[in-house]
């Protein structure tokens, strides 16, 4: 099938007969990665257009407007670092900013660098096909329009394909129903309402804590408890603000050297080398500190050595028991199928205390599974629970899901979804054999997925920009990884994760989503060797004339 015909089939019935718009580069997505890539490519003098499904910039922060949404990276480590002016002009109000502030930041960035003039909003890309003869990509939009470019850069984010639970009757409910990642732009009130939240991941934990403040009654439907740790958020006072603004070079230098580009880096000791009393005091300090110190700044072996992990897991178990008054309820909130940190740790602000409130009830789905959503509420194996509102905090088809939702075809009509059916295969998490000139920012097998994301976005974007500069300089028009390089990187990604205890449990990080057919096998979706090693490898590849890539 010709690429053009393929696009028309995937786009709406009203395929546009006009010639497609033409650019040198098309970027899909106007989140932080798409915006920063646009900024850099403009500097190269490229003709570049960003296509964004939403009606505003911000990506994750545009869509995830659910109550309580906020950072768990320190705000002052999160902003883009490329512009001194931007860093000095923007003042984060809290150490861990809430979603509205972060969305304002994204808009500020777009305004300051006049990015909107190169962004088309309300343009959801539904298909993209490589045209071998023209050496071009053609993308198709939901409304039938098309556009063409030599390069296609996906900036679609690792967590942008929300999933509803595979429960019968979803859609039958007659009350208000929201997925957290598709939260309405208008305010939603919980006052006087009986509210259900399904899901207790990082999103559910933030939502539950906020909704419990005003709902008449809140029921939490928990399938798997997670190990949550305190965020310890606070406002940034004037003196600290001055200090932060003066310290940006050191802050970013420190992030650059840490495993996940967070301000927290692992303690160089193994947990069991440290005497028990000192270890306990260390965990107490980390628990009392803001942010991910308890996870990222813990002993270096807690995520690879079960005995080391048991020590911190035991500590966290005692914390939950101390915070939840009802001992039986506390036990239900304690994970039993995985150790601390082996799934993404939700950071919370009073989450466990919510269960001491008289208006909150936990429904343990391991004992009484949901049978169906009914017009009036939720039916579990033992009761019918009536509600005014159901909130689905049921997560995402992570990392590859957003790719799967676009009908992407490469050389010879190869479908990306088919190529990745048994797990992603990439070179450096940035390109895929068979898909020339397509570059995947923050894609699978990339360190960025496991990262304080803007720090890794910067690395990805700057590397891609240099690649395009190099190709232009040398007169190359086509780049694709060799199958050998792709195979070697994919093997290396699997080896990088092989020792991780994270592989012993289902989570979005191990590619499992029981609501999505074909997503039941565990495969580590990100490069687990850490951001510094990843950067070194990318730099070495570039310095070697982009070895592993075939340039033509
Ligand atoms: P998630 O971690 O995948 O959690 C989804 C939740 O929904 C889980 O508790 C899951 O239970 C439950 N669930 C899914 N399908 C269900 C079903 N059919 N029946 C009952 N329960 C069901 O998704 P998330 O909470 O949206 O978080 C995803 C990631 O986004 C986070 O890990 C984090 O990286 C990011 N995030 C970041 C922030 C932040 O920066 N502050 C905030 C929120 C999210 P099971 O565990 O049993 O599958």
Image (spheres, rainbow, N blue to C red):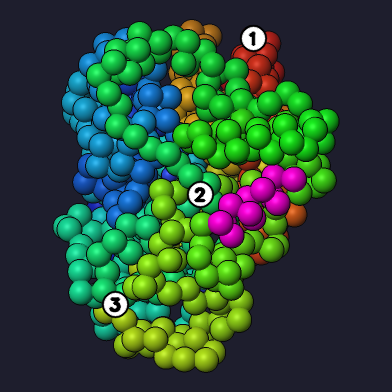
Which residue is found at the position 35% from the left and 8% from the top? 246
Establish if 393 lies above or below 114.
below
Mark 3 and ligand 1: say if the CB distance to the nearest ligand atom is below 8 Å.
no
Q: Is residue 322 left or right of residue 385?
A: right
Question: Would you say residue 328 is visible in this rendering?
Answer: yes
Label 2 beta carbon within 8 A of ligand 1: yes
Q: Secondary structure at mark 3?
A: strand
Residue under pointer 1: 543
**Of marks 1 and 2, which one's residue comes earlier in the chain?**
2
Q: Is residue 320 on the magenta stretch?
A: yes
Q: Position of residue 421 (x, y in %)?
A: 65, 56
Which residue, given by chain and number where applicable, does mark 3 sit on? 194
How far is the residue under mark 2 from the one under mark 3?
Answer: 25 Å
Crowding at mark 1 (Cα within 10 Å: few <14, some 14-19, many 20+): few
Most common secondary structure along the magenta stretch: helix
Q: Tell which circle, 2 or 3, labels the residue nearer the N-terminal end.
A: 3
Q: Which residues are magenta?
A: 311-322
Labels in figure, total:
3
Which residue is under mark 2?
A: 346
- Sequence-wise, the earlier of marks 3 and 1 is 3
């Amino acid at each position: 099938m010709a690429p053009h015909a393929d696009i028309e089939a995937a786009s709406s019935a009203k395929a546009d007969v006009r010639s497609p718009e033409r650019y040198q580069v098309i970027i899909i997505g106007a989140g932080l990665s798409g915006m920063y890539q646009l900024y850099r490519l403009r500097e190269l003098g490229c003709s570049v257009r960003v296509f964004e499904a939403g009606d505003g910039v911000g990506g994750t922060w545009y869509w995830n407007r659910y109550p309580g949404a906020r950072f768990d990276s320190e705000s002052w480590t999160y902003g883009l670092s490329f512009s001194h002016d931007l860093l000095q002009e923007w003042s984060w109000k809290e150490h861990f900013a809430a979603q509205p502030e972060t969305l304002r930041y994204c808009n500020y960035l777009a305004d300051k660098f006049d990015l909107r003039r190169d962004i088309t909003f309300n343009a959801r890309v539904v298909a993209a096909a490589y045209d071998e003869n023209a050496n071009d990509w053609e993308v198709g939009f939901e409304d039938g329009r098309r556009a063409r470019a030599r390069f296609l850069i996906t900036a679609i984010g690792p967590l942008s394909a929300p999933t509803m639970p595979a429960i019968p009757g979803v859609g039958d409910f007659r009350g208000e129903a929201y997925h957290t990642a598709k939260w309405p732009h208008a305010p939603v009130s919980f006052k006087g309402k009986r509210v259900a939240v399904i899901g207790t991941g990082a999103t559910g934990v933030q939502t539950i804590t906020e909704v419990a403040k005003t709902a008449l009654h809140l029921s939490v439907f928990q399938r798997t408890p997670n190990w949550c740790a305190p965020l310890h958020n606070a406002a940034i006072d004037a003196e600290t603000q001055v200090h932060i603004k003066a310290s940006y070079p050191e802050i970013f230098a420190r992030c650059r050297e840490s495993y996940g580009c967070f301000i927290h880096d692992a303690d160089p000791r193994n947990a069991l080398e440290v005497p028990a009393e000192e270890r306990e005091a260390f965990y107490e300090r980390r628990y009392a500190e803001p942010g991910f110190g308890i996870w990222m700044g813990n002993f270096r072996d807690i995520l690879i050595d079960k005995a080391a992990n048991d020590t911190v897991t035991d500590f966290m178990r005692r914390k939950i028991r101390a915070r939840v008054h009802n001992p039986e309820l506390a036990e239900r909130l304690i994970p039993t199928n995985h150790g601390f940190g082996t799934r993404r740790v939700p950071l919370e602000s009073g989450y466990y205390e919510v269960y001491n409130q008289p208006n909150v009830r936990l429904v343990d789905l391991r004992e009484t599974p949901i049978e169906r959503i009914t017009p009036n509420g939720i039916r579990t194996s033992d009761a019918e629970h009536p509600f005014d509102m159901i909130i689905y905090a049921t997560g995402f088809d992570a990392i590859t899901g957003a790719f799967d939702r676009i009908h992407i075809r490469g050389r010879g009509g190869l479908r990306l979804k088919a190529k990745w059916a048994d797990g992603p295969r990439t070179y450096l998490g940035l390109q895929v054999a068979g898909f020339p000139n397509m570059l995947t920012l923050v894609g699978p097998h990339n360190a960025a997925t496991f990262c304080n994301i803007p720090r890794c976005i910067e690395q990805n974007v700057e590397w891609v920009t240099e690649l395009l500069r190099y190709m232009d300089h040398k007169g190359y028009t086509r780049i694709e990884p060799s199958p050998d390089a792709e195979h070697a990187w994919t093997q290396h990604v699997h080896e990088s994760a092989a020792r991780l205890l994270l592989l012993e449990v289902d989570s979005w990080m191990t590619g499992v989503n029981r609501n999505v057919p074909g997503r039941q096998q565990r495969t580590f979706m990100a490069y687990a060797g850490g951001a510094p090693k990843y950067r070194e490898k990318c730099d070495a590849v570039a310095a070697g004339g982009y070895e592993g890539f075939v340039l033509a």
